[in-house]
Amino acid sequence: MSDVTRILEAIERGDPAASADLLPIVYEELRRLAAARLSRESAGQTIQATALVHEAYLRLVGDPAQQWDGRGHFFAAAAEAMRRILIDRARERGAQKR
């Protein structure tokens, strides 16, 4: 069992320190995911990969009801959260133009 999986299980059990332990371990991989996601976006995107990682991370660990099936599930959920953040931002820009 990986360190990420152990920490995710601790978060599910309600360990308050576990969230702080998770970010340093997963940060670089989340940053790569964000950079890859942003590279596929159209020009003019104003969010940086770092901001996208932080916002996605807050969405992921901020939901106490979230259950994780391990490391792979966490990173898949992170990629989906990043996608949704970018979609929400695009919708907001579209609404501002109208």
Image (tube, rainbow, N blue to C red):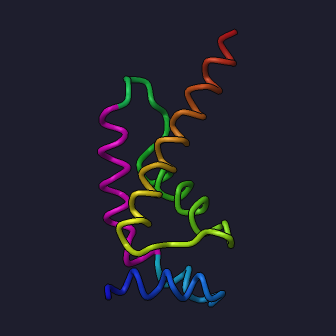
Residue shown at the point (50%, 51%) measured from the top left: 51
Q: Is residue 79 left or right of residue 54?
A: left
Quarter of the picture containing the N terminus is: bottom left
Give percent across and percent down for residue 78.
Answer: 45, 57
Q: Nearer the viewer, residue 17 or 78?
A: 78
The rendered magenta stretch, by its main secondary structure, is classed as helix
Is 75 located above or below residue 67 in the figure? above
Give percent across and percent down for residue 31.
Answer: 36, 57
Q: Nearer the viewer, residue 85 or 64?
A: 64
Q: Is residue 85 left or right of residue 74?
A: right
Residue shown at the point (45%, 73%) measured from the top left: 69
Residue 32 shown in magenta: yes
Quarter of the picture containing the C terminus is: top right
Residue shown at the point (53%, 62%) measured from the top left: 57
Give percent across and percent down for residue 66.
Answer: 61, 68
Give percent across and percent down for residue 96.
Answer: 69, 18
Q: Quadrant of residue 75?
A: bottom left
Residue shown at the point (32%, 85%) measured from the top left: 2
Q: Is residue 92 left or right of residue 42?
A: right
Is 30 located above or below residue 91 in the figure? below
Tell me the magenta residue range. 23-40
Q: Quadrant of residue 85?
A: top right
